[in-house]
């Protein structure tokens, strides 16, 4: 115990010293010397009709990088599912005892109220990613939190009825494939992969920014389905008694 405390103290002091040295060199709040960001702020709205420059960067100017990030998540979900899958020599155990449903009516009522609000907010973040802060990644995570709210307010049995494993896998796969298919529109139009070739609409409109909107939708589907599959795997394997 004393050795662990000593090691922790030494590590904590070292980390605190590094953080203090780094914070002393921080520039004042609001300082920015990145020419790349200034250029994008100046041209993104005019070139892509996207009033959210971050989405324009993620899904257009460096859309290929975002494709890699999406497939990192896709691979991570596959790895977790493979690790937690039932092995051939694994025997069925006694019937699982699920976490008890909360006895509080207030908790259940709160869950009933949170579910539709969270779904609407997640869909808004995905569909308006080119207009305001948000996008497919953020909206997908918000949508994936809906089954988690159900688990917390209604128990594991109800949670496991919501996301059928086949549907979650299909959603994740279709979202990942959809990003590539939208990118192929540029090739079909005789231009580069992931080049923005759809009508740009008007700045500030929900149907603006061309392919940025549809790339947000595919990422939202992939992220939501991927996180739901992860939650389902952990609920089945780790949260059962």
Image (cartoon, rainbow, N blue to C red):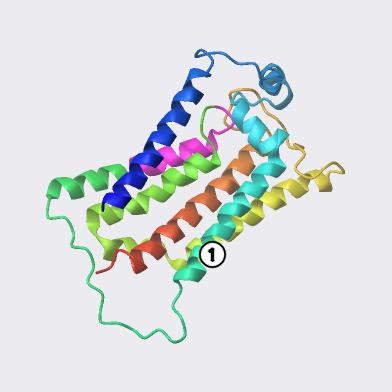
Q: Is residue 32 above or below residue 149?
A: above
- Between 78 and 46, the residue placed more toward the observer is 78
Report if residue 107 lies within the magenta region.
Answer: no
- Residue extent of the magenta highlight: 116-131
Residue 207 quadrant: top right
In-front residue for pair 156/106: 156
Answer with left or right where residue 46 lies relative to residue 162: right
List the residue tagged with mark 1: 79
Q: Position of residue 31 (x, y in %)?
A: 56, 13
State whether residue 220 appears in this view: yes
Q: Residue at x 60, y 16 (%)?
A: 32
Residue 215, given in percent of the width and then of the height, sits at 63, 43
Q: Is residue 143 left or right of residue 54?
A: left
SS under mark 1: helix
Q: Nearer the viewer, residue 238 or 142?
A: 238
Please identify the quadrant where the C terminus is shown. bottom left
> Residue at horizontal 67%, vertical 25%?
49
User: Which residue occupies the extreme right position in the image?
Assistant: 190
Q: Position of residue 202 (x, y in %)?
A: 65, 24
Q: Is the residue 31 above or below the residue 91 in the image?
A: above
- 230 lies above or below 97: above
Magenta segment, principal secondary structure?
Answer: helix
Is residue 208 visible in the rendered structure shown here?
no
Taking depth in this image into account, of 144 and 35 the one nearest to the observer is 35
Residue at horizontal 30 percent and vertical 82 percent from the top: 93
Image spot of residue 138 (x, y percent): 49, 40
């Amino acid at each position: 115990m004393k050795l662990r405390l000593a090691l922790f103290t030494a590590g904590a002091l070292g980390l605190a010293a590094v953080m203090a040295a780094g914070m002393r060199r921080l520039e004042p709040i609001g300082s920015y010397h990145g020419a790349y960001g200034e250029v994008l702020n100046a041209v993104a709205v005019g070139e892509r009709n996207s009033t959210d420059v971050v989405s324009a960067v993620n899904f257009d100017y460096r859309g290929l990088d975002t494709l890699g990030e999406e497939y990192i998540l896709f691979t991570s979900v596959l790895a977790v599912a493979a690790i937690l899958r039932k092995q051939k020599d694994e025997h069925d155990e006694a019937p699982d005892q699920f976490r008890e449903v909360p006895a509080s009516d207030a908790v259940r009522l709160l869950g009933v109220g949170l579910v539709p609000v969270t779904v609407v907010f997640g869909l808004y973040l995905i569909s308006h990613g080119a207009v305001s802060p948000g996008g497919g990644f953020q909206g997908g995570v918000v949508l994936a939190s809906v089954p988690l709210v159900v688990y917390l307010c209604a128990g594991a049995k109800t949670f496991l009825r919501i996301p059928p494993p086949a549907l979650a896998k299909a959603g994740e796969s279709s979202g990942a494939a959809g990003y590539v298919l939208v990118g192929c529109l540029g090739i079909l139009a005789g231009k580069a992969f992931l080049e923005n070739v759809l009508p740009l609409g008007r700045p500030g409109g929900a149907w603006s920014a061309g392919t940025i909107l549809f790339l947000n939708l595919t990422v939202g589907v992939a992220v939501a389905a991927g996180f739901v599959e992860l939650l389902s795997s952990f609920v089945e394997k780790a949260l059962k008694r």
